[in-house]
Image (cartoon, rainbow, N blue to C red):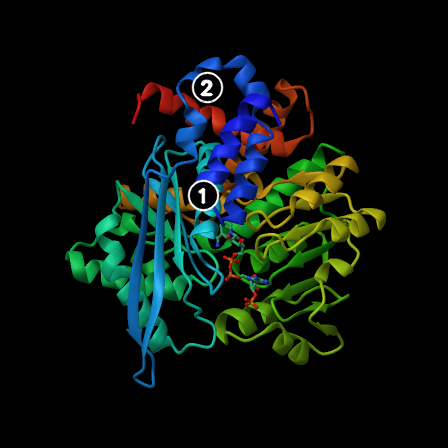
Amino acid sequence: MDARLEAIKDTVLMRNPGEAEFHQAVVEVFESLGPVHDRHPEFLEAAILERLCEPERQIIFRVPWTDDSGRVQINRGFRVEFNSALGPYKGGLRFHPSVYLGIVKFLGFEQIFKNALTGMPIGGGKGGSDFDPRGRSDAEVMRFCQSFMTELYRHIGEYTDVPTGDIGVGGREIGYLFGQYKRITNRYESGVLTGKGISWGGSLVRPEATGFGTVIFAQEMLKTRGTSFDGQRVVVSGSGNVAINAIAKAQSLGAAVVACSDSSGYVVDEAGIDVALLREVKEVQRGRLKDYAERRGGVTYVDGGSVWDVDATVVLPCATQNELDGAAAARLVRNGLVAVGEGANMPSTRDAVAVFQEAGVLFGPGKAANAGGVATSALEMQQNASRDSWSFEHTEERLTEIMVGIHDRCAATAEEYGEPGNYVLGANIGGFVKVADAMLAQGLI
Ligand code: NDP
């Protein structure tokens, strides 16, 4: 890392103790930024990096609710409003027991650059809770969401901060959150949340957008090597929103998607994952991947273990952070891996990224490859602002244009800075310069 940035990085790490994921995200970005500061000493003078690493506002709050047996439960809620240089804070809410400030800050930090790369007017933020919706009844999830929003509502708004879903927060949760916001404020402010249902202000393609976008980005990477998804053997991790839609899109482009996972195990389905069945089991019945395996029949279900033990030419990690380590990366590379498209945020460890890059594997980092979700959220905000709703075809076309644009911008930036094909560098520098320029223009705030 550049010596000037090393000192700033050390201070950031010291000021934010115990936040391992946030540290990892910061270090990964700083490693790309040396050459930018050679060209733009004014960024150093204006302390852009120090300011970028300090969220504009961090909100932590108590979320009390009662479970179905009448017992009081207490969770912790978070919203980190990281950077508003380009627009209102924008980023998802994650409900998962692992959520703490370090996770929310890593996600919020990544979101700043991701949102900048989309070319849309949105700043970066993220939030969530250590609440675990798995195994909870609809009534419990509703009471939790209502309590969460009873505090959050005062901090968000169409022009302030616009949350959406992430792990554990899908259409059901967004519905309960929106209902409570509307009730408290007495305003039908559609633009305050994205990921809404289609009949009450949502956008077509938003549910599919992150998974679809990841595959579109990976397809653009494959094109640079004269190939495509057609005939690739693909492994996807996760079986949630991003994973399911990535599987569907990869299959529509002619790939054989042979495995996916959840936090309990993974399934190998050599005939190709049956997306309709997977959607029914996961999205309608809220079941487990094990249930998919039982209903599908003739497939292998591995309890525990790692889905990265399954060979593939393309992998799409779509579950969670740090799920793919250096050893798994090395094994995949030895067995013929060609490309990685990150649907999840920071799913590859730093060791894994190094292995992919040294081996010349095409590597699309999450902040570029999974930006289709937030980009389509911004399209939802556009539709809400103009009280319009677009067709599936038109919205998908816009998503495709945006993803191809992000790919091309990352590739051109990597080339400009002397490292063609390095999408990590391209994404970090491309996103950073845009935000840094806006921060300079807006003065010391
Ligand atoms: P979902 O909650 O719909 O699905 C998450 C999936 O990942 C589930 O299969 C879950 O398994 C698995 N998973 C979650 N945590 C772990 C863990 N600690 N270990 C193993 N498996 C785990 O979430 P999404 O699909 O929305 O999100 C997936 C990833 O994509 C996240 O990294 C998220 O930040 C990122 N992302 C999501 C966007 C969106 O639009 N939704 C936008 C951009 C990025 P189980 O059910 O067993 O927990």
Near-viewer residue (285 or 49):
49
- Name the quadrant of the C terminus: top left
Say the numbered circle drawn on residue 368: none
What is the C-alpha distance between the residues marked 1 and 2? 21 Å
- Is residue 54 found left or right of 187 in the rendered image? right
Please say if the residues under marks 1 and 2 sit with CB atoms less than 8 Å apart: no
Res. 386 visible in picture: no
Check disc 1 and report the residue beneath it. Answer: 16
- Residue 112 visible here: yes
SS of the residue at dot 2? helix
- The residue at the far bottom in this view is 69
Foreground residue, 431 or 282?
Answer: 431
Q: What percent of the width, then of the height, locates residue 444?
A: 31, 23
Q: Kindly identify the amino acid type of the residue bearing the numbered disc 1.
A: Asn
- The reply, left or right, for residue 405 in relation to residue 183 is right
Taking 418 as reference, is 46 left or right?
left
Label of residue 44 in the image:
2
Ligand 1 within 8 A of label 1's CB? no
Q: Residue furthest left?
A: 186
**Taking 61 as reference, is 112 above or below it?**
above
| Image spot of residue 34 (x, y percent) | 58, 22
In the displayed structure, would residue 238 be above or below residue 398?
Answer: below
**Residue occupying the point 69% across, 25% down:** 420
Considering the image in quadrants, where does the N terminus appear?
Answer: top right
